[in-house]
Amino acid sequence: MRPLRVAVVGAGPAGLYTADALRFQKQVEVLVDVLDRLPTPFGLLRYGVAPDHLKMKSLAVTLQRVLDDPGVRFLGNVVCGADVTLDELRDRYDAVVYAFGAAVDRRLGIPGEDLPGSTSATAFVSWYSGHPDRSGPACSLDHPGVAVVGVGNVAVDVARILAKPVDVLRSTDMPDDVLAALERSVVTDVHVLGRRGPAEARFTHKELRELGELDDVDVVVRPDEIALDARAEAAVASDPVLARNVELLRAWSARPPTGAARRIHLRFGLRPVEVLGPDRVVGLRVERCRVENDGTVRGTGEVEQLDVGAVLRAVGYRGTPIDGVPFDERTGTVPTDGSARVLRDGALSPGEYAVGWIMRGPTGVLGTNRADGQDAADALLADAASLRGSRAGADDDLLELLESRGVQVVSTNGWSAIDAAEVLLGGEQGRPRTKIADRDGLLAASRG
């Protein structure tokens, strides 16, 4: 009996965990092609996890083992919906798994949001992570103040990178131009803003605690902004993570300033109402908020102006559609039946599955994708008998089709060449790795 052929669209953790689950089981032979629009695998692990989170970044070793499996093939620098259509994929594979994530940031919807100096935290993270789609520094660092809107882990990561001494970052894989820009930075005060209180903040305790461990950085918390009402007290009492976070915030609020060179201001109960210009960001107007008994947030009319030269919004992500793939514009996800099986117009679509953020929205941590991958593999294998007779049966290899169209596909070996080139570049500088940050450079490295 011939093997099942599966295409996974997206080479981030969700896609690679799915490939691993399909290959690890022994009941059906499965061959997996993992496609990605970037020349490199690992998705947000490579381009979203902060470079100084070395332990988390080491997960790449585990995911690399998936790509080393002889039954898994990496096809990078391939844009699904453009270089190859969805119909062409479904003709050549028994099943297609969508794992292309949710990489577009949400907007604030306030005046001045599009001024130079106001941008998304996503763009800033892409810049310091060496994403090949970046076009240069996400914002200038020539003003002492920066506002980061949001109180999740991305906001905390951005604040930490802005405040951390650059010498500590030289041991990471940051591109050289990023290190040079951070060395020239004059930022001294980072304002992290949440419209709700600390009981609703979404950072994990580890991420929050790291802010207090930075050298020559004071964490500033106002006691009145972390006071809890009865509803928030109940939420904290029932959640150990929230309880530890609030305990830490209270400790910081009681600690006198040390005169450190930089400060991270954790502010709660404030929402941005206007980015001030006119030609570039010169400040941010915020309004004091209160949370009503029903959980809604209301402005009080009390306003404050922050002296900042940049505004970075970190208020969430949403998915974007690929031509031919079912998509729910309201949720920004590929609709499924709850078992990873994709729905088209409300009905099951045989041979189509979705995992990760494009299925469930931008929630959870990297490890959450392992369970997603296993669920998708279980559903696909349960459908195996019907899938074998479902495809149209084009027998030519996808790689041949792509190369005939002039697509410069980065194969598994091409990625290995990029990996070796980055390690070599880092070694020349006394670092474990230095990222190649432009697409042309990555493609050149892939050719050895």
Image (tube, rainbow, N blue to C red):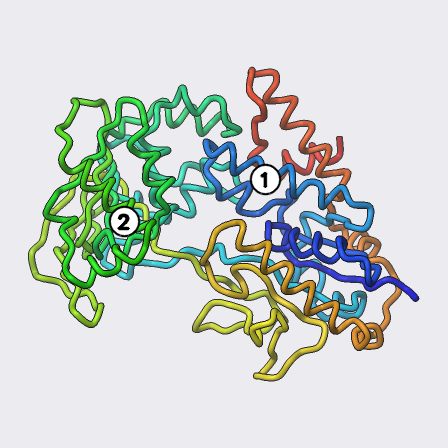
Position of the C terminus, as image quadrant, is top right
Q: Residue furthest right?
A: 1
Asked if residue 135 can be seen in this view, the reply is: no
Position of the N terminus, as image quadrant, is bottom right
In the image, is 347 to the left or to the right of 307? right
Q: Name the residue at 81% across, 50% down.
A: 71
In the image, is 54 to the left or to the right of 93? left
Say which element carries label 2. helix
* Coordinates of residue 90 in the picture (x, y in percent): 75, 69
Q: Quadrant of residue 68?
A: top right
Q: Nearer the viewer, mark 1 or mark 2?
A: 2
Q: Residues within 10 Å of mark 2 (few under 14, many from 20)?
A: some
In the image, is 15 to the left or to the right of 254? right
* Coordinates of residue 182 in the picture (x, y in percent): 37, 27
Q: Name the residue at 26% across, 55% down.
A: 236
Q: Nearer the viewer, residue 21 or 99?
A: 21
The residue carrying mark 2 is 243
Asked if residue 147 can be seen in this view, the reply is: yes
The residue carrying mark 1 is 59
**Tag on residue 85?**
none
Give the amino acid type for the residue marked by disc 2 in the picture: Ala
Give the amino acid type for the residue marked by disc 1 in the picture: Leu
Say which element carries label 1. helix
First-in-chain label (1 vs 2)? 1
Between the C-alphas of marks 1 and 2, the distance is 29 Å
